[in-house]
Amino acid sequence: MGNTDTYYGNNAPFTSSDHYHSYCEISGNDFATHNMHNLQFCRLSGLADLNTENSYVQSEMYNWIKTIVTDYGFDGIRIDTIVEVPTFFWSAFTKSAGVFSIGEAFDGDYGFVAQYVGSMDSVLNYP
């Protein structure tokens, strides 16, 4: 999400604070140490972080990707910053899309990036 504050009233359909994780920011050290809690539950560059564990957020996101793919006839999707969201979400999201999916996991550790293989069709090979 684009806002850096905690006012979500203009973020339709995610206007409730329940739709977001509590405010904390990801640090460079979180990336270096693979601190998964902070990577997946804090803000990247201060941007509001959707609570992908929330069933309403899940439903809206899964329906959104299915609609976008269908309406525009996409044959594939590229997903940025997959590390910042749990793999269970990506598995259902990419299934909802119904097309080829590739995700970006910007990290130099092959073992770390490998955990995302399977939650989508392909992962960009940054290592």
Image: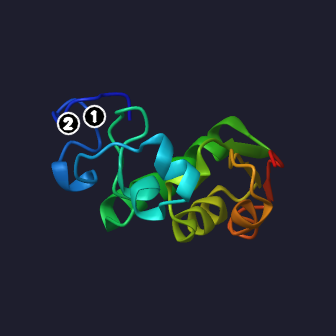
Who is closer to the viewer here, 70 or 88? 88
Residue 19 can be seen, yes or no: yes
Q: Would you say residue 63 is visible in this rendering?
A: no
At x 72%, y 62%, the residue is: 120
Amino acid marked by disc 1: Asn
Q: Measured from the top left, where is residue 69 in percent x and y?
A: 66, 45
Q: In what quadrant of the picture does the N terminus appear?
A: top left
Is 39 on the left or on the right of 83, as rendered? left
The location of residue 4, given as percent across then percent down, is 28, 29
In screen coordinates, is 84 left or right of 23? right
Q: CA distance from mark 1 to mark 2?
A: 5 Å
> Type of residue at label 2?
Tyr
**Residue 33 in picture, x, y percent from top left:** 54, 57
Foreground residue, 94 or 27? 27
Dots 1, 2 in contact, CB < 8 A? yes
Looking at the image, residue 1 lies above or below residue 70: above
Q: Secondary structure at mark 2?
A: loop
Q: Which residue is mark 2?
A: 8
Give the label on residue 11, or none: 1
